[in-house]
Amino acid sequence: MPYVLVSTQIRLETGPTMVGDEYSDPAIMNYLGARKTTMLGNNFSEYHVDDSPRLVLDKLEKIGFRVVTMTGVGQTLVWCMYKETDCIT
């Protein structure tokens, strides 16, 4: 999967950071040290780390991801990361 969404609440800029959903690449989630959680009332799971978003972005860059875009949505900061993959057509 070449895309990863990273997000955090503005008041929680030092962590925790959301790094994926239940369909995220387990190898990447393991590399980040993420834990899979399901919030009460949600019917989906998310991966979280205690690291700040800056540390997460640094770790992802080390394995070939780059920031495509970043935005603020309400009280949430979101980064879209992309990694080039070898395509065989």
Image (spheres, rainbow, N blue to C red):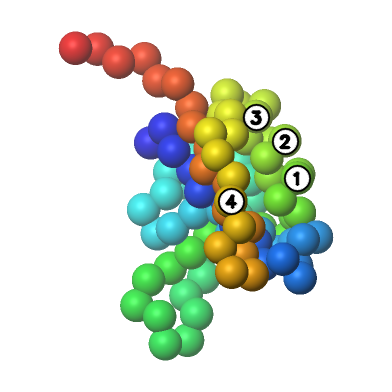
Q: Left of 89 or right of it: where is 5?
A: right
The residue type indicated by label 4 comes to Thr
Left or right? Give the position of 14 relative to 43. Answer: right
Can the viewer see residue 27 in this picture?
yes
Q: Which residue is mark 3?
A: 61
- Residue occupying image coordinates x 36% and y 14%: 86
| Image: 14 above or below 64 | below
Task: State which tag comes first along the sequence, 4 or 3.
Answer: 3
Question: What residue do we see at 61% from left, 64% from top?
Answer: 76
Instruction: Tell me, for residue 58, which label it has, or none.
Output: 2
Badge 4 marks a residue whose secondary structure is: strand
Does 33 appear above or below 16? Answer: above
x 59%, y 45%: residue? 70
Circle 1 or circle 4, nearest the eye:
4
Q: Secondary structure at mark 1?
A: helix
- The residue singled out by tag 1 in the image is 54
Number of the front mark, 2 or 4: 4
